[in-house]
Image (spheres, rainbow, N blue to C red):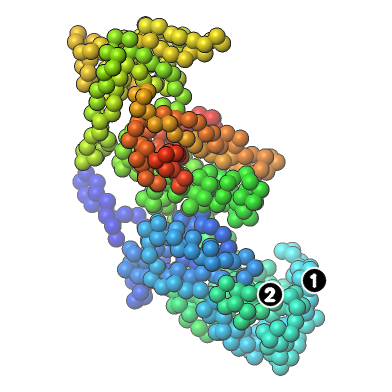
Amino acid sequence: MENRTTENQTLPDKLNFIEEIIEESIRQGEPRIHTRFPPEPNGYLHIGHAKSICLNFGLAKKYNGKCNLRFDDTNPVKEDVEYVDSIKEDIQWLGFQWDGEYYASDYFEKLYLWAEELICKGLAYVDNQTQEEIRLNRGTVQKAGVDSPYRNRTVEENLQLFRDMRAGKYADGAMVLRAKIDMAHPNMLLRDPLMYRIIHTDHHRTGSSWCIYPMYDYAHGQSDSIERITHSICTLEFDVHRPLYDWFIEKLNIFPSHQYEFARLNLNYTVMSKRKLLHLVQEGYVSSWDDPRMPTICGLRRRGYTPASLRLFAEKVGVAKRDNVIDLGLLEWCVREDLNKSAQRRMAVLDPIRVVITNYPQEKVEYIECVNNPEDVQAGTRSVPFSRNLYIDRDDFMENPPKKYFRLQPGGEVRLRYGYLIRCEEVIKEADGKVVELRCSYDPQSAHGESSDGRKVKGIIHWVEQKAAVEAEVRLFDRLFVSEDPEEGDGYLANLNPDSLKVVKGYLEPSLAQAIVGEKFQFERIGYFTADYDHTKERPIFNRTVGLKDSWSKIAK
């Protein structure tokens, strides 16, 4: 158990409820801890999966156990090797490595033989009802279900029909195999659940070998048992599935894996339904699965989130027994925490006003030393060119400012970051009144944060040298939805944020042209940015990961 230190003593870290279960298992003599992460390869992983990955792999690491990666590939219609590869890439990017790579399809033969065993025990039967008839006859929470007219077939007939299903003698939907439990059971999932259905579709691993495929509820627990998983950790919606999970294990008399449930991750301003995310991609509301506005792990990675920030987020969210909604601001805080320590600082101007320092020598260019990261002395410094012609951000000038405005104004003085004090002497405007240029004077004795007369200037603004500045495409990503609950009102499509992406031309320090894809920076006084996958030296492109402060907290109020 890890410890935390107070001023006077060292205290054990508080365990979450799953860790308490595991530690009790160990006290009761459990010799090993074995978990698994079992995604279905039918889409890209999202931030909710990241939490589950961190939990399952983290528990295995903490208790010197093992964690399997098992693909629940029981539905060939929706699954693809593309998703298998992306899932493995995401897990490794998060910093984890599985102890064994498995597939439910590895167990198709064993699962089939176990199904025959249940038939022989009178615990499963072939049903010829249509999907709609099965649904209607299942009943409701208040009303018991109705037995299928095929429920009392003989073992011999069921066995032959099931073998004929496997042999491909019947069309899709012609019949299914069901467990024979109790059509009046208060848990609807135990009202003779489906075990197998007919699907004449090639599988991405087994090809055309099979035309019947096990249902998730049948394959899941048995796959855990085959791998001798000790702690099968699922999200809370699988709580009602646990009795069925246990029923199959008990009736087959196999290794008793145990299922435990924790609250799934719900984030405000976010949807995580695979169906809805797919719709956003297919209908062009976002550009792809790795669009930086998506909650997918690949989207977060492209936006500039780091593995450490997602692991920190999973840690901060914790493991709960009841569903709740997590503020997206916590995720943004986590990436700020990580990037503040690791990202080098650079200056960038995204909405420029020209500045001409009229008393600075015409042809002179000097180089100013700038700190790369004040949080990391090992990061060193860099040289940035400075001349009489600069750009500053439009937000850093105001003609008629309010009180306590410390940035540039007519007759006012500010310090240029790492550089000199300048004073605005003249404002140049276009015919429509738009400010296009500021003519300023500088104090030659004010370099290095000092002034000749010791005067104090509160305002500090960033800048770039005009001639050396690199033009770049800067993608200002924001939250994809304007509502904390995207489903409220007319639904998630009606709550899409029309300003979730703005593309601007930025003027950056010249060194940023040398950035490599995925490299992260703090654009000083603006936010954290990442070189996009499309970034090149000839065409620099940067994505905003997150602003320096939470700009949504005031909007939400």
Q: Which residue is mark 1?
A: 133
* Dot 2 or dot 1, earlier in sequence: 1
- Residue occupying the point 33% across, 63% down: 62
| Residue 160 quadrant | bottom right
Quadrant of the frame with the C terminus = top right
Q: Position of residue 363 (x, y in %)?
A: 28, 17
Which corner quadrant holds the N terminus? bottom left
Q: Nearer the viewer, mark 2 or mark 1?
A: 2
Identify residue type, mark 2. Ile
Horizontal side of residue 162 vs 91, given as left or right: right
Task: Name the residue tied to disc 2.
Answer: 199
Residue in the picture at 64% in, 91% down: 120
- With respect to residue 408, does 539 lie above or below? below
In the image, residue 513 sits, relative to residue 246, either above or below, namely above
Q: Image point 79% across, 76% down: which residue?
A: 129
CA neighbours of label 1 inside 10 A, class few (<14), some (14 to 19), many (20+): few
